[in-house]
Image (tube, rainbow, N blue to C red):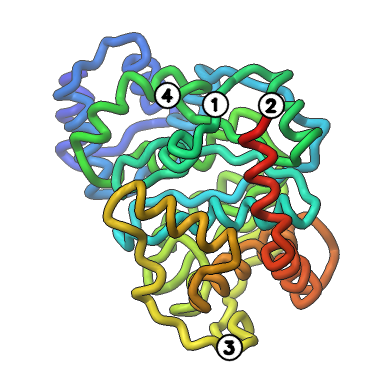
């Protein structure tokens, strides 16, 4: 292990097999906490190469607990985090809007490591019972249209590194890996990333995978569509820019301060419930609707305006909030 660290500190890169072995060694307890933090530090200063990312992905995928939910044409809406913007939980709210529009959502996430509130913090605080039992998850999807996969229940290695991630207090390689690792191998993915370099790398990886996907990056650094800048989007078919003018058709004046989350979990829960209740600010509401619209675009052949209307009706009718209420009552 010391030899690998020496190479990494010398700015050398790992082969796919070396990267894979690194993750396996962590899972077996062969790498101590100090070494894990050192590895995280290295990859915080640079993104992994394609070979390294492939190796990390293959190892964590091989080590994961799988669930078979292929019967559902579901979507995951997720961001890498680490953009240091401290936004409210945009992708999680958008997920409920999509489910409220009649689609199936299999959301994968974790507790926060580099921000105040991750999606798992939200679900835990609301009283959702995390599970990795396939039948329970299928029951939630059949009855509600939504289920949540708490990452450490499917990736035991995350329990070994979670304490170090929290101590580190900023994004790590595991932020970059997280969106790749939905254990249900879902058919559709809306993935937000915090840099163009990562967007290109994910696009390269997903070109060889059957999943239907869209990888988005706001050019001012957000890992979600925030209507504060143009957006670069990669799909299996092409790559293109979405300009603010074509996304912000309602010509909403976006106040970036409205995108900032609360100072603690309780404040973020309040923001979360307010928006789902139709009581968010104009900025908050428009941003979650745009992200939900992009997700719906992946799931059907409707045009943008039709899917925006579906997302808006889901929120304004109370259907999105009803999904949450029904999920928590199971």
Q: Is residue 104 visible?
A: yes
Query: Label 1, on which residue?
Result: 129
| Mark 2 closeness class: few <14, some 14–19, many ≥20 residues within 10 Å | many
Residue 261, image quadrant: bottom left
Choose the circle earlier in sequence order: 2 or 1.
Answer: 1
Q: Is residue 324 above or below residue 250?
A: above
Choose the circle earlier in sequence order: 1 or 4.
Answer: 4
Query: Regarding mark 1 in the picture, which secondary structure is present there?
Result: loop
Question: Where residue 155 sits in the image (x, y, percent)?
Answer: 48, 22
Side (left or right) of 46 relative to 272: left
Q: Which mark is residue 137?
A: 2
| Mark 4 closeness class: few <14, some 14–19, many ≥20 residues within 10 Å | many
Q: CA distance from mark 3 to mark 1?
A: 41 Å
Q: CA distance from mark 4 to mark 2?
A: 30 Å
Choose the circle earlier in sequence order: 3 or 1.
Answer: 1
Q: Which mark is residue 245?
A: 3
Side (left or right) of 150 relative to 221: right
Choose the circle earlier in sequence order: 4 or 2.
Answer: 4
Query: Label 4, on which residue?
Result: 20
């Amino acid at each position: 292990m010391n030899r690998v660290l020496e190479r990494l500190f010398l700015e050398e890169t790992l082969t796919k097999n070396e990267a894979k072995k690194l993750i396996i060694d962590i899972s077996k307890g062969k790498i101590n906490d100090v070494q894990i933090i050192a590895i995280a530090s290295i990859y915080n200063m640079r993104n992994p190469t394609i070979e390294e990312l492939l190796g990390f992905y293959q190892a964590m995928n091989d080590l994961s607990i799988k669930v078979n939910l292929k019967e559902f044409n579901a979507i995951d809406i997720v961001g890498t985090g680490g953009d240091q913007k401290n936004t409210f939980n945009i992708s999680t709210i958008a997920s409920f809007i999509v489910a409220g529009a009649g689609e199936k959502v299999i959301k994968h996430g974790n507790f926060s490591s580099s921000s105040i509130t991750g999606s798992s913090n939200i679900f835990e605080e609301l009283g959702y019972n995390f599970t990795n039992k396939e039948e329970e998850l299928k029951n939630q999807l059949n009855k509600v249209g939504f289920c949540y996969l708490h990452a450490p229940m499917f990736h035991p290695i995350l329990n070994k590194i979670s304490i170090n991630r929290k101590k580190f207090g900023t994004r790590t390689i595991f932020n970059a890996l997280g969106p790749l690792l939905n254990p249900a191998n879902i058919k559709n993915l809306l993935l937000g990333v915090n840099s163009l370099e990562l967007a290109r790398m994910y696009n390269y990886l997903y070109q060889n995978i059957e999943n239907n996907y869209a990888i988005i990056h706001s050019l001012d650094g957000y890992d979600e569509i925030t209507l504060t800048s143009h957006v670069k989007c990669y799909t299996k078919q092409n790559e293109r820019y979405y300009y603010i003018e074509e996304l912000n058709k309602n010509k909403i004046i976006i106040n970036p301060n409205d995108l900032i989350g609360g100072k603690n979990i309780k404040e973020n829960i309040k923001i979360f419930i307010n928006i789902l209740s139709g009581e968010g600010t104009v900025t908050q509401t428009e941003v979650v609707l745009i992200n939900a619209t992009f997700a719906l675009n992946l799931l059907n052949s409707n045009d943008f305006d039709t899917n925006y209307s579906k997302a808006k009706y889901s929120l304004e009718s109370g259907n999105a909030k009803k999904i949450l209420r029904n999920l928590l009552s199971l």
